[in-house]
Each structure stands twice: as structure tokens, then as C-alpha cells.
Image (tube, grey):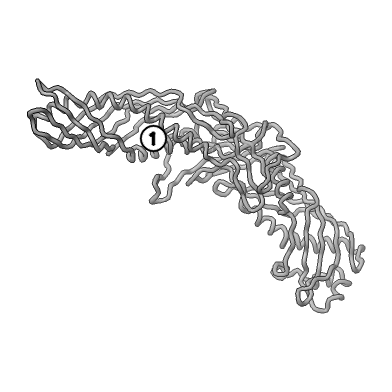
Amino acid sequence: MLKAWYSFLLCWLSLQLEANPGLKVRITQKGLDYGRRIGMELLKQEVLKETFPSWSGQESFSIVKVNYVISRLRINAVDFPESSASFIPGTGISLSVVHASATISADWKMNAWLLSKDQGGITVSISGLFIAVIIEVSRDSTGRLSVLLHNCQTSINSVKVKLSGGSSWIYSFLSGSIEKPVHTKLNKNLCLNIKYKIQMMDAHLRKHKVLSQIDAFVQIDYSLVSSPAVFKSHMNLDLKGTVYPLGKHTDPPFVPAPFALPDKDDSMLYLGVSSYFLKSASLAYYKAGAFNITMSKELATTFNLNTALFKDLVPEIALSYLTACPMLLKLMATSPPVISLNADRCILQITGCVEVFAVLPYSTTQYIFAGNLTASTRVYLTITKQKLIISLLLKRLQFSLLHSILGFSEQMSLAENFLSYALQSAVIPEINDKLGKGFPLLNLAHTTLTGPVIKINPGHLVIATDVDYKRKEGGDEDLHSHS
């Protein structure tokens, strides 16, 4: 029953880190309350799908023993008018439901010695249902979230039975005799059923992927590095948050530094992203060759990068090509790009070498010049759905010539202008396209982050956000969130 509610609430577990985490997730009371409201709606839908086994009994009616069977039990309606959820420090989450009610229908059959068999329908009205559950949360040996039923209490105030069909004397017998067994069975089985559902959810969480492929270059380790830390006002999840080249799982030669989330509760979630996460991403992309870019003839043509550009910049080159030829650039990073997080600013510095060629007729190429460059870029961070999107903007370029067939060292500033244009118009957009897939921050189905605010601090950034859950029409758990 609680599977859908709790999986929504605890799916913020798709992130991770090392001894110190690279990523942090905080669920506030506001987030827990939203999860409870969504969970109650999902729980209603789960309950209405429940099936129950038939059960039988025997009662004495005067000197006659009557055997009866109750079958095809189904819940027709359920209501949870009052519910609450809270954090239990050091343990997990408490969920309580009071004044709940339900209507159950079933079929009955009976037979007795010397009496004919009889059958009909039955409607059971349950009111004053109370459920209190405490769910313990922890980390298993594989870094996945684990859940366990810590405590369960239930009580039912009233069970009323209404019969239809059959002989009239049967009504008075079954109505009085069946209410008590139904009351007893529900009280006995509710916690057993809740325990079973939580065990199923725990088994599902153990199958959850903690190593997730992001694109053709990298994967992220989202395992928990410690058990969730539960406080009265919030719960923290510390995640490894290491980015690896695809297919490799060697930790980077640096470790995450400790950082803290702000002591706030205005948003449902607070997501902390450390510089370690960004540095490991930079190293992983570098090792995967993502920063090695060859600008094709087609791309050069698209952005009008050709030898005619040198007419005013470096006349010697322009005069060597009577017909304007497309320019081909090969950019290779010589070390992992360096990321720095300062107050409200993120800078990425790329160091590499560049080779420039002219594409002659019949697609042959002619080397023109090569050099070292250092490009300083401003990093812009945005949130789309559940992903952190990174884009770069070139701010400054330094270039030093290594080789040239024409020797134009006195026009270095002009060559820098050409490379700056090439980087801004073609190379940086290609890098941004690779980064455009984004880094998943959460793994919640049918959920988007609403009103996210990114705050860049020295050494880490914090994303404060609410969430919106919305199931598509026709889904098994069609749901529209509400306040």
C-alpha cells in the first residue's frame, strides 16, 4: 500500500558521494508534507487495486452449525481525511492516518445441516480507522537506500455489515456474526500487509541503479556514502557524486572537501553540488576526449570560417589562396579544464593546443599554423526538469604561436581575434551541445523541479527548489498534484 507514497518521497536517493559527499540532498518538512499529500492520493489508488483472499468460518445458530465463505473481497471506496508525516530523529519517517473510512463489498455463501445452501452479497462499511507507521531508513552495503517497518499500530472504531440476497433469517445471523470476524481480521492483517509492502519496496530499492550513464562520455556514481541523517526538521542524504569516464571506475586523484547546506526550510528540497563533483566531471570528460574537437569542413562553411577572413588579419595567408578555402580547426585539451566556484560566479579555464588547416579542393588539407591557447569561460548554470544544464561563454583568450608556414608572429593579436571568433561561433557551441544533455540531480518519475534558485558559493553551489508531480493521463497512477 505504501509503496507509491514512499518511493515518491525517498526517490531523492538518486545522488551520491565519498567520505565527504560530492552531492547532498535535503528534504525539508515542506517537502515531506508535499510527499504525504501526493502519497495519500497514490495510496488511495493502490488500495482500490488491492485483492484479498477468500476466508471462511463457522458459527452456531441455535442448535445448527453454519459454515460460510466470504469471497471476491474488493475495496470500492476509501477516504483519508486527516493524515500527517514527520521526521523521527535518528530513525526515519512517521506517517499517521486518522478517521479513515472504507467501503468493502464481497460475496457470501453458506450451508448448514438440514438447511438449504444460500448466497448473496455483502457490503462492509469501516469507519474510524487509525494507522500509525514508523519507517526506518538506512544505507545498505551497496550504497542503496534501505527501508524497514520500525513500528505499526492500527485500530478500527466501527465495522457495519449489510447483506443482500438469500433468506431473510440469514441476514440476522450473518450481520451479527460476521462483524466481529471482519473487525478482527482487518486489525490483524493491516500491519502485516503494510510490512509486506515495505519489504517489496525495499527489494525494489535494492535493484535501483547507483551508477548512471549520462551521455556517450561519462557516468555518475549516485550511491549513498552514509545512512540518511534524520533530524526533527529535515533529512539529509549524502551521495558520492563522482563522475567517471564511461566504462571506467577509478576514483580521481582528489577528494571532496566538506560543505554544508544552508539552514533554511523555505523550499521542499535543497541540493548541494560541490566543486569536487564538477572537478570529477571535468576530469572524466577530459579523459573521454570530449574536449578534443575537430571542426569539420561543413561546420566551417556554416560559420563562414575561410581563408578570406585573413584578408585584413594576415594578408600573407589570404594572398596564398586566390579562392577562399574553408578553415579546419583541431582543438585538443592538454589538461583537464580547471573549474573555480566563487561568490555568484563559476569560471572554467581550458588549456590546450590548436592546429589550423586550409581545406583545399578535393578535400585535401594544408597546414597553416599551430599554437597553444588558454580560454577562460564563464559558466552559466540552469535547471531544466531534473537536470543541471551547463553552458559556456568565452570571456578571454590567450594564444602563443608554435609553428607557421608563413611566419606572422607580428600579427599575433590578429590571429587571436580569428581564434576568438572561431571559438565563439563554432567550438564553444559544439562543447555546449555535448554538455546540453545535463546532469540528472534527481530520478523521480513524472516530477519536475519548480522555481529552482541556484546560489553559487565558494567551493559549492546550492539549488533550492520545490517539486511538482504530475502523472500523464492514462497512467496507472494518474495524479495531478495539488496544494
Kindly identify the residue that appears in the image at 46 percent across and 24 percent down.
Answer: 150
For this rendering, which residue is in front, 257 or 72? 72
Q: Position of residue 483 (x, y in %)?
A: 43, 39
Q: Is residue 365 above or below residue 392?
A: below
Residue 349 lies, in percent from the top left, at: 77, 49
Judging depth in this view, the residue of 345 and 422 nearest the camera is: 422
Give the residue at the far bottom of this rendering: 322
Q: Quadrant of residue 239?
A: top right
Count of marks, rendered view: 1
- From this view, report whether residue 189 is shown above or below residue 370: above
Q: Residue 22: x percent and y percent?
A: 66, 37
Name which residue lies at 82% across and 56% down: 353
Residue of label 1: 1
Q: Residue at x 51, y 43 (%)?
A: 444
Left or right of 374 on screen, residue 457:
left
Query: In the rendered view, would you say 317 is above or below 92?
Result: below
Q: Please state which amino acid type lies under the numbered disc 1.
A: Met
Left or right of 308 on screen, residue 459: left
Residue at the outermost top position: 63
| SS for dot 1 | loop
Quadrant occupied by the N terminus: top left
Label 1 Cα neighbours within 10 Å, binned few <14 / some 14-19 / many ≥20: many
Q: Residue furthest left?
A: 114
> In the shown orientation, is residue 338 left or right of residue 96?
right
Residue 402 shown left or right of residue 267 in the figure: right
Nearest the viewer among 42 and 71 is 71
Residue 37 locus on image (x, y percent):
42, 36
Asked if residue 49 is positioned above or below residue 353 in the image, the reply reads above
